[in-house]
Image (spheres, rainbow, N blue to C red):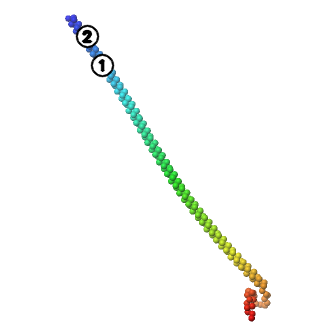
């Protein structure tokens, strides 16, 4: 009996030991699973945090790239505006230069025309002055000729008066003594 009891007790103890061992094993497994779940959770959180960080970095990177592209587009637009302003300035300079050249040409043409008109007026004035001088000289020559003729006439009259004989008696004095003498000589037989 005792032997059977011992065997049963041993079997019971073995069974309890096995059950304890199984319980401890199950507890270890449970704890291992819990640790694994915790580790998996932490790793998942780490991966998610890393993914969020990477996504945030990517977002900032793309945002910065887009901002840089936007700044480059703005710079390109500004360069294009500068180029257009420079081109407009050069066009204006060319236009102003052409306009100034035309203005200079017009002014030069006006000056040339004024010079031609002035020279023509001067020539006309000189011609009229010369004509007046020629006319004055002609009048002076004519006056001198008339004066000379008058002097010659007076001198001839003076000579005629000095050369004719005295008239006796009443009677008109002949106007031309030589003509009278010639007439008298023609009347003689």
Query: Which secondary structure lies at badge 2?
Result: helix
Quadrant (top left/top right/bottom left/bottom right) for the C terminus: bottom right
x and y percentages locating residue 56 in the rendered image: 39, 33
> Who is closer to the viewer here, 51 or 185?
185
Residue at figure coordinates x 41%, y 35% from the top left: 61
Residue 1 picture quarter: top left
Q: Which residue is mark 2?
A: 13
State whether residue 89 is above or below residue 105: above
Residue 100 picture quarter: bottom right
> Is residue 94 left or right of 62 when viewed as pictured?
right
State whether residue 124 is above or below residue 188: above
Query: Which secondary structure lies at badge 1?
Result: helix
State whether residue 36 is above or below residue 161: above
Q: Which residue is mark 1?
A: 29
The span from disc 1 to disc 2 (Cα, nearest Å) is 23 Å
Residue at figure coordinates x 48%, y 49% from the top left: 87
x and y percentages locating residue 21 in the rendered image: 28, 14
Residue 175 picture quarter: bottom right
In the rendered structure, which disc, 1 or 2, sits on the residue that comes first in sequence?
2
Residue at figure coordinates x 55%, y 58% from the top left: 105
> Is residue 146 left or right of 24 when viewed as pictured?
right
> Is residue 126 left or right of 40 when viewed as pictured?
right
User: What residue occupies the far left of the structure in this picture?
Assistant: 1
Neighbours of disc 1 within 10 Å: few (<14), some (14-19), many (20+):
few
């Amino acid at each position: 009996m005792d032997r059977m009891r011992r065997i049963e007790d041993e079997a019971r103890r073995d069974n309890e030991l096995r059950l304890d061992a199984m319980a401890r094993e199950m507890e270890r497994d449970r704890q291992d699973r819990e640790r694994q779940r915790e580790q998996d959770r932490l790793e998942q959180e780490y991966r998610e945090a890393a993914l969020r960080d990477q996504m945030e970095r990517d977002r900032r990177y793309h945002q910065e790239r887009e901002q840089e592209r936007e700044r480059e587009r703005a710079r390109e637009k500004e360069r294009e505006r500068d180029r257009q302003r420079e081109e407009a300035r050069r066009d204006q300079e060319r236009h102003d230069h052409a306009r100034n050249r035309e203005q200079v040409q017009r002014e030069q043409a006006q000056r040339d025309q004024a010079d031609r008109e002035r020279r023509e007026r001067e020539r006309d004035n000189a011609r009229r002055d010369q004509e007046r001088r020629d006319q004055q000289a002609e009048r002076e020559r004519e006056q001198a000729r008339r004066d000379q003729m008058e002097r010659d006439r007076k001198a001839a009259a003076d000579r005629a008066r000095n050369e004719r004989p005295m008239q006796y008696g009443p009677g008109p004095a002949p106007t031309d003594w030589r003509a009278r003498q010639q007439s008298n000589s023609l009347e003689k037989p």
